């Protein structure tokens, strides 16, 4: 216990710096006052200091698990897109800041208008609540009918024979002879975008980054992470929630409160040739499924075991995969998705071999114990009925988002109890805008850019800004004493090769070109009348597009985010950063605001993405995006030793979950992001210092004090950084974040970085050994 806490104040502003009176500066000054708790001591708890006033006045909306700066900007972007979709094409053209020359909508105006109408039709189908409500859960019946037919043994037989064969199936266990049946079932589910027993990615081969490879990995789980399956109360809640939602989805008409809906369900079930289930049947199904999922979760690797790319890179010939993991017919599976004429690759990447080994041993016990007699195998094996039920439930749950309010609200309640704490459904327009962005991100992104971003001219301004942070990162390498000369040289080469993607895609597709966008989404068929059929078409397009990459070079112009996303990323295989227009908004970026605010917010975010090139995983890739050991052994060991300081630091942070339960942050799981946070703010601060001290025009708004704010530019840099991460989070969501997210909770993204910053301690005059200025600091970059 500290006997005395010394309160500290940041250094006052430099008197020679003029006070800015532009509207941007006036607005920024007001925001500072709205966020900072000037009664808090920045050296004791900088997060409380920088966010305290905002936290005091903020409440979490009933439909959200959290609220913060990122959420606020995303909501603003969502509202912008809503207004676009509910307006006219003429309104967009009239209000755009983009020049015709750069966003040549005039020469392609007919195509542009058709694209916009396509978006409106899709949005309208999603907003047609009356039609969606009238259909209830029945749109999903044809999809589950296809799955159930695969597990049946001849629908042409009489009903009595069907029942007898179904009973036989109930008693049968999965064997090697069942592989074709399971393969067909998984093909059907994967065609619907559901990946129940393994996940797949088609992307750059880590060691041949110009070539695409098929990578197979363990699946995502029904609950947020495997830890939840170890909590009895959580599993009981999940079990009850599944019973409730499955009763709504496929329960008999007698279990439906609304007689009209009961009749509708019965009619559509008959049309799809499926049988609705009694409450007892559903309960038995849920028990089987939850037990199966629990076992599946137990054989998956922990999340922090999936972070080392060298351990995830396991090329394996297809015939070896079939021999080791014969749970399905792998060749048949891949052939079902590959375009005509494209052969199945000879070699695939298996990202989690232990999972697949365990899966094969579980489903086929004879693999691990060949001498086991048939009777014992029958006792050990997994019943076909259980596998069918598991796949059926995965199928149903995947489509809940596209169904009626009653179904969605039922599942929302269960999710809220387990992991979000948020019981209310969001406003329908937010759901539908999110669907538009998720399905037509580049196309709707064009219209967002026209309304909220300045086009090519502003893109060039942002590029200049990014280049300054980029140069600062490069300059810092000369001062990193623990790098040996050869590793430093290679690191400099890598940083020099990092490319920038800014605001929106200009090639694949070209957001500036209506024709390019039309061609990109051409195979999607949209109707105003059926939201569910639209979703089926979009999923089919996305799957076909992914598989069309097999056997082709990597398209390095492709973006992995939409223009309206409030986010950014670094790509290891292409050695590039991408910063969408959605995050280039106030308060993250404001060209007319003082430099220190932009460097503290978007500058630190850019620095964060640049640092990912040298985080615990990114450092293993060279400047050409190839997974390669280019570090000297001694330097690599020094990196690992220094990394442990961060692991231990963040391991010591805790969050408070439901019932006041304390859960520690996982410093290993969050290591890469923590390194990026720490390196990013250091690089951005150095860039800010350089442009501030070298400014040619000190009287300009970018080089001025905020009106009425008695803080130095350096202090405002750090408060601007912290403001990016100000957030209020429900306890359930905080625990889920700790278990599943590679990012630390927002509070510790602020506290962890400033504790390690000697510059911060100097700016806020924090005495040594105060909470924000500990004697031991973790530093790598």
Image: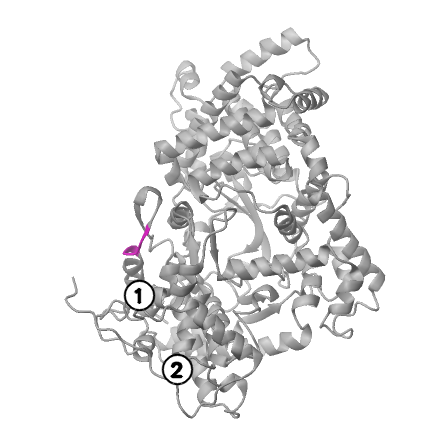
Residue 493: tell me if it is visible. Answer: no
Looking at the image, residue 246 sits to the left or right of residue 442; the answer is left
Instruction: State which quarter of the image contains the N terminus.
Output: bottom left
Which numbered dot is residue 273? Answer: none
- For label 2, the residue is 712
Looking at the image, residue 124 sits to the left or right of residue 76; the answer is right
Q: Nearer the viewer, residue 565 or 570?
A: 565
| Vertical side of 722 occupied by 710: above or below | below
Percent x, y of residue 550? 64, 50
- For label 1, the residue is 45
Q: Residues within 10 Å of mark 2 (few under 14, many from 20)?
A: many
Q: Which residues are magenta?
A: 651-655
Examine the image and state in which quarter residue 501 appears.
bottom right
Percent x, y of residue 522? 77, 51
- The residue depicted at 69 percent of the width and 66 percent of the height is 451
Looking at the image, residue 248 sits to the left or right of residue 382; the answer is right
Residue 482: tell me if it is visible. Answer: yes
Q: Give SS at disc 2.
A: loop
How was the colour assigned to the protein in this rendering? one colour
Q: Residue furthest left?
A: 3
Q: CA distance from mark 2 to mark 1?
A: 19 Å
Percent x, y of residue 341? 72, 44
Examine the image and state in which quarter residue 41 appears.
bottom left
- The residue depicted at 52 percent of the width and 69 percent of the height is 588
- The residue depicted at 74 percent of the width and 69 percent of the height is 95
Looking at the image, residue 477 sits to the left or right of residue 194; the answer is left
Q: Nearer the viewer, residue 449 or 385?
A: 449
Q: Residues within 10 Å of mark 1 (few under 14, many from 20)?
A: some
Q: Going from the N terminus, do you reach mark 2 or mark 1 first?
A: 1
- The residue depicted at 79 percent of the width and 53 percent of the height is 117
Q: Is residue 294 magenta?
A: no
């Amino acid at each position: 216990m500290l006997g005395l806490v010394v309160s500290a104040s940041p250094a006052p502003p430099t008197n020679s710096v003029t006070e800015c009176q532009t509207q941007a500066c006036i607005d920024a000054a007001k925001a500072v006052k709205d966020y900072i708790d000037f009664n808090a001591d920045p050296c004791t708890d900088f997060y409380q200091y920088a966010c305290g006033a905002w936290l005091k006045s903020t409440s979490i909306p009933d439909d959200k698990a959290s609220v913060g700066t990122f959420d606020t900007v995303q909501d603003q972007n969502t509202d912008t897109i809503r207004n676009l979709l509910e307006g006219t094409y003429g309104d967009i053209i009239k209000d755009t800041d983009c020049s015709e020359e750069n966003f040549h909508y005039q020469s392609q105006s007919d195509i542009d208008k058709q694209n916009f109408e396509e978006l409106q039709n899709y949005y309208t189908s999603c907003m047609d609540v009356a039609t969606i409500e009238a259909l209830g859960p029945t749109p999903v019946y044809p999809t589950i009918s296809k799955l159930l037919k695969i597990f049946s043994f001849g629908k042409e037989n009489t009903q009595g024979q069907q029942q007898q064969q179904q009973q036989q199936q109930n008693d049968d266990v999965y064997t090697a002879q069942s592989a074709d049946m399971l393969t067909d079932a998984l093909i059907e589910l994967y065609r619907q975008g559901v990946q129940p027993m393994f996940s797949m990615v088609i992307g750059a081969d880590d060691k041949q980054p110009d070539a695409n490879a098929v990578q197979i990995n363990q699946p995502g789980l029904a609950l947020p992470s495997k830890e939840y399956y170890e909590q009895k109360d959580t599993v009981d809640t999940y079990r009850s929630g599944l019973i409730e939602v499955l009763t709504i989805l496929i329960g008999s008409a007698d279990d439906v409160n609304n007689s009209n809906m009961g009749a509708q369900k019965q009619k559509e079930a008959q049309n799809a040739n499926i049988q609705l289930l009694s409450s007892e049947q559903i309960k038995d199904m849920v028990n089987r499924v939850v037990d199966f999922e629990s076992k599946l979760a137990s054989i998956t690797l922990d999340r922090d075991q999936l972070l080392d790319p060298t351990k995830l890179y396991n090329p394996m010939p297809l015939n070896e995969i079939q021999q080791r993991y014969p749970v399905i017919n792998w060749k048949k599976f891949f052939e079902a998705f590959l375009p005509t004429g494209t052969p199945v690759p000879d070699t695939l990447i298996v990202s989690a071999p232990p999972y697949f080994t365990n899966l094969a041993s579980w489903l086929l016990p004879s693999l691990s114990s060949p001498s086991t007699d048939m009777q014992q195998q029958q006792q050990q094996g997994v019943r076909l009925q259980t596998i069918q039920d598991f796949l059926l439930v995965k199928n149903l749950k995947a489509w809940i988002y596209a169904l009626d309010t009653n179904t969605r609200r039922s599942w929302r309640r269960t999710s809220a109890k387990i992991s979000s704490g948020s019981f209310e459904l969001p406003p329908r327009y937010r759901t539908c805008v999110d669907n538009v962005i998720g399905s037509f991100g580049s196309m709707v992104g064009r219209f967002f850019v026209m309304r909220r971003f300045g086009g090519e001219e502003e893109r060039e301004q942002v590029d200049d800004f990014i280049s300054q942070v980029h140069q600062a990162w490069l300059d810092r390498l000369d001062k990193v004493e623990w790098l040996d000369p050869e590793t430093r040289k290679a690191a400099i080469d890598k940083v020099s090769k990092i490319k920038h993607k800014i605001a929106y895609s200009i090639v694949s597709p070209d957001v500036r070109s209506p024709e390019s966008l039309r061609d990109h989404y051409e195979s999607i068929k949209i109707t105003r009348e059926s939201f569910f059929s639209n979703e089926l078409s979009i999923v089919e397009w996305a799957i076909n597009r992914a598989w069309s990459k097999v056997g082709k070079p990597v398209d390095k112009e492709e973006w992995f985010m939409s223009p309206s996303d409030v986010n950014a990323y670094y790509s290891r295989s292409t050695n590039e950063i991408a910063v969408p227009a959605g995050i280039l908004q106030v308060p993250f970026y404001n060209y007319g605001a003082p430099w220190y605010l932009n460097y503290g917010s978007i500058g630190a975010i850019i620095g964060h993405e640049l640092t990912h090139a040298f985080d615990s995983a990114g450092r293993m890739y060279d400047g050409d995006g190839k997974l390669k050991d280019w570090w000297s052994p001694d330097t690599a060991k020094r990196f690992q030793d220094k990394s442990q300081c961060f692991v231990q630091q963040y391991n010591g942070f805790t969050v408070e979950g439901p019932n006041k339960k304390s859960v520690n942050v996982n410093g290993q799981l969050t290591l890469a992001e923590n390194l990026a946070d720490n390196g990013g703010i250091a690089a951005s601060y150095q860039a800010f210092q350089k442009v501030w001290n070298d400014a040619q025009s000190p009287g300009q708004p970018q080089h001025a004090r905020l009106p009425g704010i008695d803080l130095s530019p350096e202090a405002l840099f750090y408060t601007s950084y912290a403001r990016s991460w100000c957030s209020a989070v429900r306890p359930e969501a905080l625990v889920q974040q700790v278990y599943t997210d590679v990012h630390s909770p927002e509070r510790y993204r602020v506290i962890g970085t400033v504790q390690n910053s000697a510059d911060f301690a100097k700016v806020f005059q924090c005495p040594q050994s105060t909470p924000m200025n500990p004697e031991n600091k973790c530093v790598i970059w």
